[in-house]
Structure formats: structure tokens, C-alpha cells
Amino acid sequence: MRAFKVCPAILFALTVVRLAHAQDEVKRSETEFYVQTSGGAAEVCGLDYTIMYVDRRNLAGIRGQLAWMERNGTFAAALAIKGFDLNAQTPIPFPVFRGFVVIDGKSVLPSITLKADQPTDFVGGYSFENAAAITYAINGKKDWL
């Protein structure tokens, strides 16, 4: 698997247990593009992201992926989000109930909520149409049709 640092053309909007406040301050954010291959062919492409911020007086963070794949002529995408309270010596997960992608100021909600590895995590799946729209937004294009 190869990873390239990129500047994403989309924003992630998150609904978590903690409400966003105007005084929240992003301390660090990273995004990496990756391609997973199988037998020499691309299997899954995606963005790994990390955002650390101060939530009132607590240091918190989210990590996750926005991944897309094509199988048997079907194109789909998935959004995964994990939330952590970082004030303790060991990060403590906090529940993330919902997440979505914002393209040109419009929320693109997942079509389905999928089972996550941990009960506090969120994973949503996107249909063909929305997966294509997300991919075109990442590439800086306005419309996929």
C-alpha cells in the first residue's frame, strides 16, 4: 500500500456526542491518500484523516477514512469515523452517532449505516450516485454526469 499526502477538496462534517462550539480550536489535521491493491490491480482507494481539536477545555480527536471501491461494475464509498478524548494517558473513545461529507456546502448523507468494529464508531455507506459525486468533488470537478 502506498500513501501520498494530499489536500482534500471536500470537508468532513461530523455529528458527535459533543456539540461543536465556536471556541473549538483545531490543533492538528492530516490527510493521506492511499491505494490498496490486490493482484496488481487497485482494490480500494481512499483518504485517511486525523483531526485533533480542543473541545472547550478537553483535547479530542477524530480519525477515519473515506474509501471508495468498484466491484463487479458497482461503485460505492464508505465513511468511517472514530472519536477519542485525548486528555487521559490512554485515548478514551467517545460515541460518534453520525457523519457525512459536505460538497459545495451541501451535506451528502450515507445511504446506509454499517456495522463498525467498535460500538462507539460510525461507518456509513454511499450509493453509486453519491460515491461518484464524492469522487468528482475530490478531483475538483463540479458534476459527474
Image (cartoon, grey):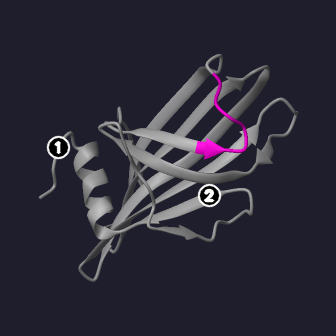
Where is residue 32, by image quadrant?
top left
**Mark 1 sits on what residue?**
142
Three-letter amino acid code of the residue under disc 1: Lys
Cα distance in 3D space between marks 1 and 2: 27 Å
**Residue at 27% across / 65% down in the picture?**
129
- Residue 19 is inside the magenta segment: yes
Where in the figure is residue 101, as x and y percent of width and height?
A: 42, 47
The x, y position of residue 124, in whole percent, is 51, 62
Expressed as whole percent of the image width and height from the top left, the position of residue 123 reads 57, 61
- Can you identify the residue that label 2 sits on? 122
SS assignment at label 2: strand
Left or right of 121? Residue 41 is left
**Position in image of residue 121 (x %, y %):** 67, 57
Q: Which residues are magenta?
A: 15-21
**Residue in front for this viewpoint, 42 or 118:** 118
Looking at the rendered structure, the secondary structure element under dot 1 is: loop
| Residue 27 relative to residue 42: left or right | right
Left or right relative to 83: residue 35 = left
